[in-house]
């Protein structure tokens, strides 16, 4: 018998719309699973059970996702009246005073938010081991990282606490946890989901919000519900001709797909990840696509200093934002060592240097663009290694640049889609012999999430992963 | 020289200034010294000169300028390990054990010497400081990994310089620079901090004379808190004369020795036989061909020491030979490593049984007539890609046996040739006695033509 938590979001919403189950029952089932499994996973930063039960009993807006239990990432994405820590001890008592733009749209779609999911401090790491809450564990192997910075969301969805959860991505933070936790994680095109009203852009245009899900169609439905540029937005990708949900149901015509197992800057690639890409390339050929080994040509140094410059200035700014939120400067022990390293680095960056860094990112974007005129998608591993053991990625290596470089050795490809603004998805097509998920990254053409949904929908139908569950909380 | 300083014949400050001046003059061509410690050295020398203690209370190295291999810590200086990755590392706060013992004996650190990245090669060239050259023949390498120290002593920049040996790194530079160099039995000198290659590495001396070698060993030896297998303080070494001698051309699989090396090795074997009044027995010790045992142990331990993530993130900033060393280590499993650890015992048993109480084995220290300075055997090779069979030194690191390299002639390319002698474990004195006899019978030039040993420059005896 199928348990309700095995269903994806659209599946759970169907139960509600057919009156087979009430929203309150769905929400309580999710809360039960959180209470049973979160002590081990440690993926919930702040529960919102009372509020969720209240909302579950009220009249919810109708729509394909109405009534589904959901979680939001505890980084930005404020919920009125609820603690928002951004992964920081400095904000452990800070209560948000309004719903953010994404949260508003999620509530308008009828989703019921049952809690906020853990994230590393200021979203800085490819692992979710913030000192304020302690490490979030990967449901597939509790000694390993759930990825970051949307690791809490990924752990929650992977362990079926909720069928989907919000996430955000400035250098891979949707796709890395999706890969680590065997989930589908799409970073949409820059500007696809508006940052209104709180911001125009985040991280100089690198960052986008969206979600991690188990199914492709959930990601598509969520994007339909939350996307759309708004007056005053700095970026306006062309709106899609059709709903993304429709695209996920249709096989693509044969696509021109490039693939590569080579990481930028000569970073080594684990054989498991290399084998996964090679096998996927072969599979795409079998499905009728034109597949060729190729990668874009650009100055790979752009992934180092310019990115650290932007990231560190963001941290220096976050420091001041935190100070204004709590009415005083954060103490030494309220921010993590790696955050201080970024803050210090950021404070030394001049305005001219910051503009130069953005110029270099735009130059790289132009150098890469012709590659996507040639190809519909570019396949690489999402990560250079299977999910790493906990304790590796959240520590200081002596400075911001050193820390970034170590992160890059785990996460070399994802930043490329952030600096170009192209959409990119991690698809859970492989598991290694130890049972650890290996995600495959498809980077698409600017604005063309539709092509990515068609392709991932096809892969999900032919090589699905819906019957794979992590050991924790499984039926047997 | 210490006596000259002690008796106030010459001041420590003068001696230190001479060292600094010689480094300034000689180093540009050789690139042996990579960091200078001038101000602090002069201040220490002045403080020594002001001391009112009687001569007898000054340490045996009082006022003697000392260079330290940039793998070892000197308080207040950074330790680069010859790597771009550590170019901006924080300064050490505590001396390593041997630097601290030599300084406690009165030596004054004037600088640090070059090495290949991570000390993992038998030549001395890296991306941070460049290539060190052999004062005997500038196109050729002084060997490695203690090549900077060896080139500095051989050229007379300073009278003493530290060295370590995890795979030959005392003996190879000693061989190529015409020095006598001893890798003591592992455990004679305590370990602190823990070396990157935990059990295979040891500190040890090289010098231009056996008397200096003995003095340095006596100051360096001894246990230290934290080392579980160091020999106790009052362990009595037994010297004497070997009762049996073997000659082995190689300890790795490889063809016949190159002609130049073979000729000098034969001459060395004949001379040794004569000196010992023994028939030297020729052997081909296949059971001591250790294969990749050394590489498995050292690369796995080195990757672990830095951390996998750090290594993976920085492979592209490493010297090509350091990079392949680390890549090999990244590919190893715990089972690979433990199998190699257990195999060590087999090699120890082989050598213990062969050598018995007091036999020795002679071999060329290096089965090649020198390396080109950037780590090539032949001009057409890739820099840093030396074939494994040139090395005859790893066995003694794997097993812990003591091994000495003695100057035994000069190859046609002007690079000195070293004769390696191995003895049973804890019979270091046997090697030192033999070295003394060898030095008497076959006195060797203490510096290359055109250079002057440190003492003579000061007009001291």
Image (spheres, rainbow, N blue to C red):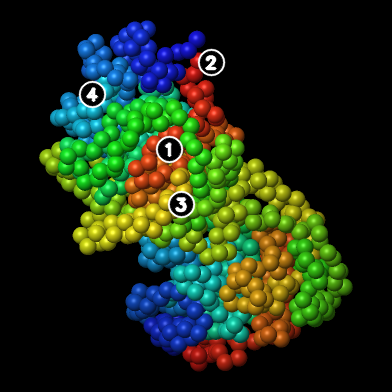
Q: What is the C-alpha distance between the residues marked 2 and 3? A: 48 Å
**Along the line of sight, the residue nearer the viewer: B201 or B125:** B125
The residue where tag 1 is placed is: A452
Q: What is the C-alpha distance between the residues marked 1 and 4? A: 26 Å
The residue where tag 4 is placed is: A108
Q: Is mark 2 on a helix, strand or loop?
A: loop
Q: What element carries label 3?
A: helix
**First-in-chain label (2 vs 3):** 3
**First-in-chain label (1 vs 4):** 4
For mark 1, does the 10 Å Cα neighbourhood hold few (<14), some (14 to 19), or many (20 or more) residues? many
The image quadrant that residue A90 belongs to is: top left
**Residue visible at 44% across and 53% down in the picture:** A371
Q: Mark 4 lies on which chain?
A: A
**First-in-chain label (4 vs 3):** 4
Q: Position of residue A61 (x, y in %)?
A: 23, 18
The residue where tag 2 is placed is: A476
Res A380 seen here: no
The label nearer to you, 2 versus 1, is 1
**Are the residues under badges 2 and 1 in a single subunit?**
yes
Q: Which chain carries label 1?
A: A
**Are the residues under badges 1 and 4 in a single subunit?**
yes
**Along the line of sight, the residue nearer the viewer: A215 or B435:** A215
**Are the residues under badges 4 and 3 in a single subunit?**
yes
**Residue visible at 32% across and 21% down in the picture:** A65
**First-in-chain label (3 vs 1):** 3
Q: What is the C-alpha distance between the residues marked 4 and 2? A: 37 Å
The circle on residue A374 is 3
**Along the line of sight, the residue nearer the viewer: B150 or B205:** B150
The circle on residue B34 is none
Q: What element carries label 1?
A: helix
The label nearer to you, 4 versus 3, is 3
């Amino acid at each position: 018998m199928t348990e309700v938590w095995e269903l994806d979001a659209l599946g759970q919403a169907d139960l509600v719309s057919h009156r087979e189950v009430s929203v309150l029952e769905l929400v309580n089932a999710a809360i039960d699973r959180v209470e049973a499994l979160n002590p081990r996973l440690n993926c919930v930063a702040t529960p919102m059970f009372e509020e969720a039960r209240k909302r579950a009993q009220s009249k919810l807006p109708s729509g394909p996702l109405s009534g589904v239990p959901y979680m939001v990432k505890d980084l930005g994405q404020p919920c009125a009246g609820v603690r928002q820590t951004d992964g920081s001890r400095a904000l452990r008592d800070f209560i948000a005073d309004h719903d953010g733009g994404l949260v508003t749209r999620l509530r308008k779609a009828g989703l019921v938010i049952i809690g906020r999911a853990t994230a590393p401090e200021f979203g800085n790491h490819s692992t979710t081991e913030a000192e304020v809450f302690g490490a979030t564990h990967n449901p597939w192997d509790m000694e390993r990282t759930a990825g970051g910075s949307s690791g809490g969301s990924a752990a929650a969805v992977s362990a079926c606490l909720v069928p989907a959860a919000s996430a955000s991505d400035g250098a891979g933070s949707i796709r890395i946890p999706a890969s680590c936790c065997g989930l589908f994680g799409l970073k949409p095109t820059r500007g696809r989901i508006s940052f209104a009203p709180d911001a125009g852009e985040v991280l100089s245009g690198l960052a986008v919000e969206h979600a991690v899900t188990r199914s492709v169609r959930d990601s598509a439905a969520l994007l339909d519900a939350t996307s759309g540029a708004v007056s005053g937005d700095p970026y306006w990708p062309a709106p899609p001709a059709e709903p993304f949900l429709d695209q996920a149901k249709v096989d693509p015509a044969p696509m021109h797909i490039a693939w590569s197992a080579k990481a930028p800057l000569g970073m080594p690639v684990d054989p498991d990840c290399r084998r996964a890409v090679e096998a996927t390339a072969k599979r795409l050929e079998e499905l009728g696509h034109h597949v060729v080994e190729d990668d874009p040509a650009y100055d790979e140094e752009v992934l180092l200093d310019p990115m650290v410059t932007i990231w560190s200035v963001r941290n220096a700014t976050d420091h001041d934002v935190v100070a204004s939120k709590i009415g005083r400067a954060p103490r030494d022990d309220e921010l993590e060592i790696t955050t201080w390293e970024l803050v210090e680095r950021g404070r030394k960056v001049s305005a001219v240097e910051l503009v130069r860094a953005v110029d270099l990112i735009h130059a790289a974007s132009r150098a890469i663009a012709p590659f996507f005129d040639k190809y519909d998608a570019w396949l690489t591993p999402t990560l250079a290694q299977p999910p790493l053991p906990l304790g590796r990625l959240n520590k200081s290596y002596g400075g911001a640049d050193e820390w970034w470089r170590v992160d890059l050795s785990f996460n070399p490809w994802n930043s490329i889609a952030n600096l170009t603004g192209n959409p990119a998805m991690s698809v859970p097509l492989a598991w290694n012999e130890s049972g650890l998920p290996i995600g495959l990254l498809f980077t698409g053409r600017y604005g063309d999430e539709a092509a990515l949904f068609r392709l991932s929908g096809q892969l999900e139908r032919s090589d699905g992963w819906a019957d794979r569950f992590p050991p924790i909380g499984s039926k047997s | 020289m210490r006596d000259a300083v002690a008796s106030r014949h010459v001041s420590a400050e003068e001696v230190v200034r001479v060292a600094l001046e010689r480094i300034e003059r000689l180093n540009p061509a050789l690139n042996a010294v990579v960091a200078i410690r001038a101000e602090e050295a002069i201040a220490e020398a002045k403080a020594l000169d002001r001391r009112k203690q009687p001569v007898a209370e000054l340490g045996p190295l009082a006022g003697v300028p000392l260079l330290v291999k940039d793998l070892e810590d000197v308080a207040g200086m950074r330790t680069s390990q010859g790597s771009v990755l550590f170019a901006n590392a924080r300064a050490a706060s505590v001396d390593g054990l041997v630097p601290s013992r030599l300084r406690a004996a009165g030596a004054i650190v004037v600088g640090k010497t070059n090495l290949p990245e991570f000390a993992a090669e038998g030549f001395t060239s890296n991306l941070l400081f460049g290539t060190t050259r052999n004062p005997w023949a500038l196109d050729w390498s002084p060997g490695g990994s203690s090549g900077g120290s060896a080139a500095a002593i051989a050229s007379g920049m300073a009278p003493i310089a530290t060295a370590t040996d995890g795979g030959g790194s005392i003996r190879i530079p000693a061989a190529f620079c015409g020095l006598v160099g001893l890798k003591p039995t592992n455990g004679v000198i305590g370990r602190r901090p823990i070396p990157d290659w935990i059990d295979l590495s040891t500190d040890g001396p090289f010098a231009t004379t056996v008397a200096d070698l003995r003095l340095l060993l006596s100051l360096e030896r001894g246990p230290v808190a934290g080392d579980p297998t160091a020999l106790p303080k009052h362990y009595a070494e037994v010297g004497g004369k070997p009762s049996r001698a073997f000659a082995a051309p190689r300890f790795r699989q490889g063809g016949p020795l190159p002609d130049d090396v073979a000729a000098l090795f034969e001459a060395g074997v004949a001379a040794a036989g004569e000196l010992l009044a023994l028939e030297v027995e020729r052997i081909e010790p296949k059971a001591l061909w250790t294969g990749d045992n050394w590489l498995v142990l050292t690369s796995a331990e080195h990757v672990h020491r830095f951390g996998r993530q750090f290594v993976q993130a920085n492979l592209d900033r490493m010297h090509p030979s350091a990079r392949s060393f680390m890549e090999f280590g990244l590919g190893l499993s715990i089972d690979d490593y433990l199998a190699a650890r257990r195999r060590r015992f087999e090699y120890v048993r082989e050598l213990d049984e062969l050598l018995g109480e007091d036999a020795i084995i002679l071999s060329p220290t290096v089965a090649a007539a020198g390396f080109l300075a950037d780590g090539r055997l032949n001009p057409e090779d890739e820099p840093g890609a030396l074939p494994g069979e040139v090395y005859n030194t790893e066995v003694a690191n794997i097993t812990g046996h003591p091994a000495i390299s003695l100057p035994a002639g000069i190859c046609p390319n002007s690079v000195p040739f070293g004769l390696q002698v191995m003895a049973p474990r804890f019979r270091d004195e046997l090697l030192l006695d033999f070295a003394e006899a060898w030095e008497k019978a076959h006195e060797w030039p203490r510096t290359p033509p055109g250079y002057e040993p440190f003492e003579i420059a000061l007009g001291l005896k």
